Image (spheres, grey):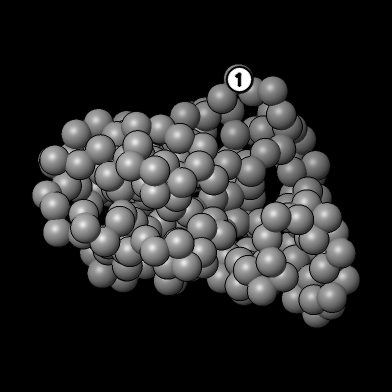
Amino acid sequence: MEGRYEVTKLSFFAFSQCWQNYELLDSGSALGFGCGPLLITRPENRDRPIADMRIGLPGQWTTAHFLFRLAYPEAPPPGQLVFSDLEQAVLDGRLDAGVIIHENRFTYHDKGLVAIRDLGAYWEQLTGAPVPLGGIAVKRSLPLDTRLSIQAAIADSVAYAFQNPEASRSYVGLHAQEMAQEVRDQHIRLYVNDFSQSLGEHGRSAIRRFYAEATSRNLLPPAPESLFCGETTFP
């Protein structure tokens, strides 16, 4: 949001706070079906009214926050925690419920927690579109050929990873040492897919729908006509 980086990955909801200076690359995004955030709690809280619960989210500008607001407009303002701390805060009773993302969706049930709602499934039922989680943004001020070359390099990297899944295993393990290998593999299978190599028209349409829904609920101003790398209609 400060414009510190030429290229950065961020949630699509956070992108709305800097789209005047950045545009989205066609490659490197995370979208999909069955991969959205989950609202989880302890079993004894499963049937409590949302309005009476202390709920934590993984950040004000996460897609998880947007989907929670979309599904529960009546909920009180949620608290904000680092995503990796939410499970324990629910287990400790500091929170009644929390919205979990990333690898926590593979581990919450092993800790005795239960899901109240799959917020990604809610989005899919509402729109029929994949859930837009996060993408890679590049500064609009960079030369177009530079932006396009970055986009192509990421697309080539994803294609190579699909063709050579073992090539990055040690690198992934080095940066995810707290995760079991099975959880790492589940995480990659769920969040890396064809949309990661190229959004295509289906992915771009889902992202535009995402911003249209946020605008219709007064959560965001209207999105610019130009969102994606190479479009030239940004004012």
Quarter residue 165 falls in? bottom right
Vertical position of residue 234 compared to residue 99: above or below: above
Q: Position of residue 33 (x, y in %)?
A: 44, 71
From the viewer's perspective, tell me whether residue 116 is left or right of residue 11: left
- Residue 8 vs residue 54: left or right? right
Left or right: where 25 falls relative to 79: right
Front-most of residues 221 and 70:
70
Residue 58 percent coordinates (x, y): 45, 40
Asked if one can make out residue 181 in the rendered structure from this viewpoint, the answer is: yes
Q: Is residue 34 above or below residue 152?
A: below
Q: Residue furthest front?
A: 92
* Three-letter residue code for mark 1: Glu
Q: Position of residue 147 (x, y in %)?
A: 74, 43
Residue at the bottom extreme, as displayed: 163
Question: Residue at label 1?
Answer: 2
Which is more toward the observer, 109 or 8? Answer: 109
Answer with left or right where residue 166 lies relative to residue 66.
Answer: right
